[in-house]
Amino acid sequence: MSAIVNYDEVEVGTELPAQSFPVTRATLVQYAGASGDFNPIHWNEAFATSVGLPDVIAHGMFTMAEAVRVVTDWVVDPGAVVEYGVRFTKPVVVPNDESGARIEVSGKVAAKLDDRRVRVDLVATSAGQKVLGMSRAVVQLA
């Protein structure tokens, strides 16, 4: 599989379709099982608050993975992402209710690079706060 987005048809400023990703306590338990990260700040409210957190928080790597889905859905081929990095700025707080939290992600082509690659800058927020900083992906286009 390869990227379906053509480099020649993309301009700096091209916006990727924004997405909203739900996060519930069940999501966190599933991610903990898949990743092996059973840190109690991600599932035990009493523990999370005892260490100074407002509530249970989503795993940073889970948050990072959800954000890059905006890019992988745009190019279709996840293998087209050749670099990806973020800074964790705020946690995604996940209350123990049916709604949980949402991670809102938007992206924009910030630069056209050599070798038919582009840099995509992402903005990820939850509850009105930016949860990832310097979120950037380099993507190999067709």
Image (tube, rainbow, N blue to C red):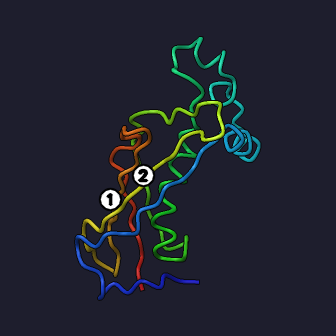
Sequence-wise, the earlier of marks 2 and 1 is: 2
Looking at the image, is 2 positioned above or below residue 33?
Answer: below
Which amino acid, by three-letter code, is at mark 2? Gly
Query: Could you tell me which secondary element the residue under label 2 belongs to?
Result: strand
Q: Position of residue 10 (x, y in %)?
A: 29, 81
Q: CA distance from mark 2 to mark 1?
A: 10 Å
Q: Residue at coordinates 23% horizontally, 70% vertically from top-left? A: 13
Looking at the image, is 13 positioned above or below residue 83?
Answer: below
Q: Residue at coordinates 32% horizontally, 59% vertically from top-left? A: 121
The disc at residue 85 is 2
| Viewer-closest of 4 and 103 | 103
Which amino acid, by three-letter code, is at mark 1? Asp
Give yes or no for contact between labels 2 and 1 (Cβ–Cβ under 8 Å): no
Residue labelled with disc 1: 121
Q: Residue at coordinates 66% horizontally, 15% vertically from top-left? A: 46
Q: Position of residue 26 (x, y in %)?
A: 72, 41
Quadrant of the snapshot with the C terminus: bottom left
Is residue 35 left or right of 62 when viewed as pictured? right
Mark 1: few, some, or many residues within 10 Å (few <14, many ≥20)? many
Is residue 124 left or right of 97 when viewed as pictured? left
Q: Position of residue 29 (x, y in %)?
A: 73, 39
Mark 2: few, some, or many residues within 10 Å (few <14, many ≥20)? some
Quadrant of the snapshot with the N terminus: bottom right
The disc at residue 133 is none
Looking at the image, is 17 positioned above or below residue 39?
Answer: below
Q: Quadrant of residue 112?
A: bottom left
Is residue 12 left or right of 30 when viewed as pictured? left
